[in-house]
Image: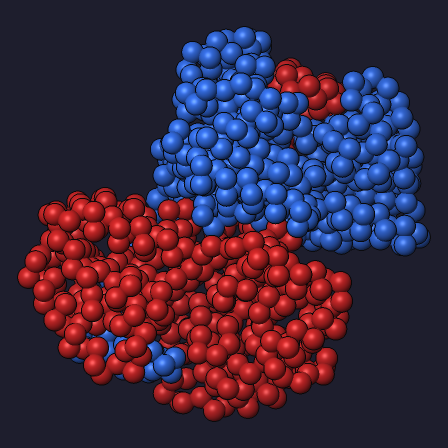
Chain colours: A red, B blue
């Protein structure tokens, strides 16, 4: 079911890593072109186009006034949630809030020299749209992870958009929306929802930033509207890399790999270990634990295609593979963690020790579960409060402070052939 | 030459603002499609395609080994810079470094409860490519503003890409590259340079993030490679809004508007004032000062199309216009600044007082001059050290800390239909 790659088989290892990296989101021209048309239609025809696409793609009859989910529908859907789930959700929200409060940044000013005051002002984005996919991919935890950092940042208007049936068919999602005190929700999905959020329609006022996962149409639409609004990163297939030595518990490691693999057929679960005996034991545990899994068909395909147990000579070698993959999730279960912490440069989140399975981070601990995928941890970060604020530079010069700098500023402006720039300082002599 | 819009003429004001906002970068499908082809060619054929496009678009003969600018060429070009410009550049670099050092973030950890340690690790991006446009748009100040925050962030590999002739024809750009101790520079430009930086060729190793301004081909290419690598925001036409009352010096205000307008025909310079007499005086000064300007044709077109003097009843009304435009640069020259500072929510950078012309920020003071344009200040920030680091979440739970949370995590996972997630915590009971 899962491939064991011994240390010596460098070629098999490289092929496996290349295969995992090749999963990254690719936008073919046909997709971009058809999504472009949808966006143009929404920009040109607003609600009319939005209703038309919603009828066609979501197969629901719609009148314009029900593009927006009414408060009563939201409340009654939320009321159906299991009380035990609701209680857990409230605790999770509190944990997520507590972590994200640490990310609050404050404005500052300083005086580099007499007569000069420079600063950085932090202000929240005005409005944010959170996209929640429909069907089985509608996760209440995603609602929490997208909304809480925006709220902590001070965003005044937070809007949820999700395909028409999500709210009524998924009480846990409705409950998350209600618990987070979001009152503006739209029953719209796909590329048309992204276009409506980015450019606005008669019913859907535009937002300044769009976050949240989605299928390839949603991802392509986010890419295309980027610039008109901000977006979070484009979510690709999910992955975990577990670096473990002989001290790791094979049953735990296998359980974590199964959890990752159950997400989707293109999810990737990789164990990198220095221990041949752990490798064998994990393979056995995988075979044993998979039988009870309701999603075992997905798991089987995921593990067969993108799962692997890679045996390495040293943890250092393991770290090189981790940096090459820049995984979304990294679990570290080794006796001596120092080698790992000093060498690993790229990972979305790192889970240390035997009792920090990835699921703790997905639902509970507090750090955001919206993480860079497909190698994007090389250059991007977990979603956070910093994604919902902007920084404005502030500058103030006194007459005297400017005076001494005039010849130098003018020299630089003249060197760029921008005489009016030079004149604008010289006139203040 | 410039339009005066009186308070009462709401319609003229709205038309003007709409016209300014409509300048924002639009990517037509033809542009995206032809740039897509260039990117595909570079991905498929590497140096061969890169050399081919460079020959065609930049009309230079090239052998592969000179895609990279050799150190001697760089040094000898830099040596030609005016000593006075070089000295000013060194001071400017020091100022920019000093401001950006304030943006350094540090990693943190905290213990929300016994047995739980959560944290955020800050690490630099490994490698960054800075694009420098060729011809008259090759500005040494842009090299400084892109490179310094990356260096302060700790980025190890910083690469400059610029069309083949830039280095030899523009000593100030060469000098900026040398002063900043950048040794890896490529004589490549346009969409093909962006593709090479994003995906790598035999000669150009790929980078993790691409920053820097460029023409519409460069902008479209950056948009298309976004996801495979990170990019800074997509630069649109530049703009300044000056909010001034009767205390402002009309000659200074006019000089600042001319400086903005000389950038390009699509640059926008707007004065918003409560003072009719200032409005008239600025219009007179513009007419007077323009005559000496070498770039007066550009200035004339820019002011005629995208320049305006808008008279408002109150500064509050002025702030509403500022928030609507979310300008790249905002100058504030009023007796009572408190109304402005409390009401303005969106601006790339704010310049306070009579002696802080925009040119101080463009070249000298320290804050970054790479700023969000075309209304992007609603959701994005000046380029900064934060753009060149990434945040990795860290999590650690003890056995006991996990144990008490198991039922709640499992309830949430089960509510999402992810049984293997639930099992991965229960197995640790």
The C terminus of chain A lies in quadrant:
top right
Q: How many marks?
A: 0
- Compare residues A394 and B56 and report the one nearer the observer: B56
Residue B3, relative to residue B416: is it above or below? above
Question: For this view, does B235 lie left or right of residue A362?
Answer: right
Examine the rendering and report whether any part of residue A10 can be seen.
yes
Q: Residue at x 55, y 90 (%)?
A: A76
Examine the rendering and report whether any part of residue A183 can be seen.
no
Q: Quadrant of residue A333?
A: bottom left
Q: Residue at x 57, y 57 (%)?
A: A30
- Compare residues B260 and B64 and report the one nearer the observer: B64
- Compare residues A26 and B249 and report the one nearer the observer: A26
Q: Position of residue A325 (x, y in %)?
A: 31, 50
Q: Residue at x 44, y 88 (%)?
A: A81
Residue A216, relative to residue A378: is it above or below? below
- Compare residues A293 and A179 and report the one nearer the observer: A293
Q: Position of residue B363 (x, y in %)?
A: 60, 26
Q: Residue at x 32, y 74 (%)?
A: A298
Q: Position of residue B402 (x, y in %)?
A: 23, 73
Residue B119, relative to residue B268: is it above or below? below
Q: Position of residue A177 (x, y in %)?
A: 52, 77
The N terminus of chain A lies in quadrant:
bottom left
Q: Quadrant of residue B110?
A: bottom left
Question: For this view, does A99 lie left or right of residue A37?
Answer: left
Q: Quadrant of residue B394?
A: bottom left
Residue A421, relative to residue B212: is it above or below? above
Residue furthest to the left: A277
């Amino acid at each position: 079911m899962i491939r064991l790659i011994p240390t010596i088989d460098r070629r098999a290892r490289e092929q496996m890593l290349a295969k995992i990296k090749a999963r990254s989101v690719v936008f073919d021209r046909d997709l971009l072109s058809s999504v472009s048309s949808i966006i143009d239609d929404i920009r040109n025809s607003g609600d009319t186009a939005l209703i038309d696409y919603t009828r066609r793609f979501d197969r629901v009859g719609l009148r314009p006034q029900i593009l927006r989910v009414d408060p009563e529908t939201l409340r009654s859907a939320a009321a159906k949630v299991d009380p035990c789930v609701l209680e857990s959700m409230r605790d999770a929200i509190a944990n997520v809030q507590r972590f994200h409060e640490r990310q609050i940044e404050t404005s500052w000013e300083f005086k580099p020299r007499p007569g000069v005051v420079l600063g950085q002002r932090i202000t929240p984005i005005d409005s944010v749209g959170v996209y929640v996919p429909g069907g089985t991919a509608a996760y209440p935890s995603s609602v929490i992870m997208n909304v809480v950092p925006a709220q902590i940042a001070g965003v005044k208007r937070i809007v949820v958009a999700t395909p028409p049936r999500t709210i009524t068919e998924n009480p846990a999602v409705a409950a998350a929306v209600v618990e987070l005190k979001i009152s503006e929700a739209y029953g719209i999905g796909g590329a048309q929802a992204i276009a409506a959020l980015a450019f606005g329609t008669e019913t859907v006022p535009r937002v300044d930033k769009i976050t949240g996962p989605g299928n390839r149409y949603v991802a392509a639409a986010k890419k295309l509207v980027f610039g008109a609004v901000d977006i979070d990163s484009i979510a690709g297939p999910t992955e975990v890399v577990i670096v473990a030595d002989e001290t790791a518990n094979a049953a735990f490691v296998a359980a974590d790999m199964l959890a990752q693999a159950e997400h989707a057929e293109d999810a990737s679960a990789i164990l990198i270990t220095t221990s041949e005996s752990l490798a064998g034991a994990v393979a056995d545990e995988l075979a044993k634990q998979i039988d009870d899994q309701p999603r075992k068909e997905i798991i089987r395909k995921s593990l067969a295609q993108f799962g692997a147990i890679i045996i390495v000579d040293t943890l250092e070698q393991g770290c090189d593979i981790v940096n090459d993959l820049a995984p979304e999730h990294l679990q570290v279960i080794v006796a001596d963690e120092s080698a790992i912490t000093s060498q690993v440069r790229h990972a979305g989140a790192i889970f240390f020790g035997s009792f920090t399975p990835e699921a703790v981070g997905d639902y509970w601990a507090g750090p955001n579960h919206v993480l860079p995928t497909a190698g994007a941890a090389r250059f991007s970060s977990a979603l956070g409060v910093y994604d919902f604020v902007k920084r404005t530079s502030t500058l103030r010069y006194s007459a005297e402070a400017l005076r001494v700098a005039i010849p130098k500023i003018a020299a630089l402006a003249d060197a760029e052939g921008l005489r009016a720039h030079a004149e604008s300082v010289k006139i203040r002599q």
